[in-house]
Structures are given as structure tokens and as C-alpha cells.
Image (cartoon, grey):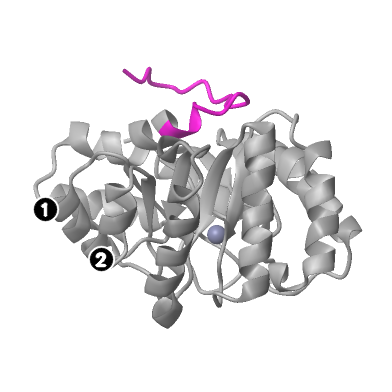
Amino acid sequence: MFYLDPHIHMVSRITDDYVRMARAGCVAVSEPAFWAGFDRGSAEAFRDYFRQLTDFEPKRAAQFGIHHMCWLCINAKEAENVSLSREVIAAIPEFLDRPGVLGIGEIGLNKNTKNEVTIFEEQVELAMRTDELILVHTPHLQDKYKGTRMIIDILTGDPRIKPERVLIDHVEEHTIGPALDAGFWVGMTLYPTTKCTPARAVDMIDRFGTERIMANSAGDWGPSNPMALPDFIRTLSSRGYANAEIHKIVYENPIRFMRQSKRFNFEGPIPVA
Ligand SMILES: [Zn+2]
């Protein structure tokens, strides 16, 4: 079965991961801009990161038959530094016309601070001005419910925002309902330590269905598993889901969301209805 991992930080992964993912059926990935495990010291460091995301990483992925697309932003963790964030936001439009850049993301909240909210709103403003899709990171563990609620309130309070052009990521059992009810797309992040296991993700599919929902591995610099989606596919299968339903969740749904971007450039191996 072909699949697309819509949220994976390949800059933190080794080339062998691309090999394993390709063998397991991965044909495309989308990589949001995020924290790299350390705070960067200048806007120039982000320019280099954006070059890596838009130039180097697509070439590395292509060697293994995997199509690579990305998202640009300053992440919620480094957004605590407001002046640096504003320099980065000013630099983003230099890279927005590059092929395969899907929009602004992953923006959001980390510890739900005032500075994070300020920079989140300024990046929503950038997305509105440039007519881009938005990918949202929601906080971890004890900060998740409140942070997700704050994000949904900010986004639904802005009449310019079309919810079908926003993906709320890292949803869990207590945040998926409000995000879907408001009309957003949702992403379930399969993670070995926090967030969600494949079994819990299938439970959420049982409860909430297969519309506007997708799953990802978020493979990054910390403990994470770039093979989480093949595990999820096996779990769905063992729980009785038909191949067509699984294909919808791990392939067609992310494509339906992403192809709203003017620079979506994945020519899939299977036509999407
Ligand atoms: Zn991420």
C-alpha cells in the first residue's frame, strides 16, 4: 500500500530512514519547519534551514523515490524570542515561491505564553496576506487542551480563515472533537513517548470516522519512529478496515488537503478521485 507521511522532520533523519520508508510504501512526505533540538541564533540560520527544506531535502528524498514537500515558519518554541521571530517572518516570503512549499507551518503554541500567541497571530496574518494553507502544532501533555482551545478560538474568531485550509496537528482524544466540529482538518501524531499510539489512533477513527483526518509519524530529532505509519496501516488492517478505507486515510486525505496549495506538486502513482 502506498502512503504519504504528511508530517515528518527528515532533516533530523538519516538516509537509511528514507530507504526503509520507501520499502514500506512511502511515496511522498511533507515536512513542516520546526525546532531543531536547539535554539538558533539568528535569522540567517533560519534562511539556511529554509534552503535545506526547499532545496537539499527534496533532492535527497528523490534518490529513494520519495517526493518531498515542506512548510515554512518560525516554530512555537523559538517564537518566545519575539524580535528574532519577526526577522524570520520577514524572511519567509523570500522562500514562499519555491516548488513544493505548501504553506505556513507548523505554527502554534508550546507553553501557551503571551509571546507565542503574538507570533502565532502574526504568522496567521502572513498566511492570510499571502493566501497560504496553515499547519498548526498543538502543545504537548498538560498544555494541550488549553492550547488547542486558544488556537481554535483565535482561528475561528478570524472571518478570513477558511477552516478547510487549516490542519490542526497532534490531536488526541480530548482535542480531536473540537477541531473537527469547527471544520478543520486534523492530524494524529503517532509517537513512542507522548502523543498517540497506532491503537489509540484507530480508536479515534472508530469514533470520529475518516473525513478530514490523517496520521503522521513526526519523526524528528528526539525519540520517534519514522516507520509509525506502516505500523498504523497494519493496526487498521487487523482491526477490520478495508484497504480502500486505509488508503483514504494514509494517502487520499492528505492529498485532498495539500492540493489546495498553489505549489502542491506531487504527481501521485495512483490517481486520487
Ligand atoms: Zn513537527
Q: In the image, is residue 232 part of the stretch drawn in magenta?
A: no
Q: Amino acid at mark 2?
A: Glu
Q: Residue at x 55, y 67 (%)?
A: 109
Amino acid residing under circle 1: Arg
Q: Which segment is the magenta one?
A: 257-273
Camera-nearest residue between 38 and 136 = 136
Asked if residue 268 lies in the magenta stretch, the reply is yes
Q: Main secondary structure of the magenta part?
A: loop
Residues 136 and 232: in front is: 136
Q: Residue at x 33, y 48 (%)?
A: 182
Ligand 1 position by quadrant: bottom right
Pick the front one: 113 or 219: 113
Q: Is residue 70 visible?
A: no
Q: Secondary structure at mark 1?
A: loop
Q: Nearer the viewer, mark 2 or mark 1?
A: 2
Above or below for 59 versus 268: below
At label 2, counting other C-alpha atoms closer than 10 Å, the crowd grade (few under 14, some 14-19, many 20 or more) is: some
Picture coordinates of residue 233, whole percent (x, y): 27, 48
Residue 179 picture location, percent across and down: 34, 53
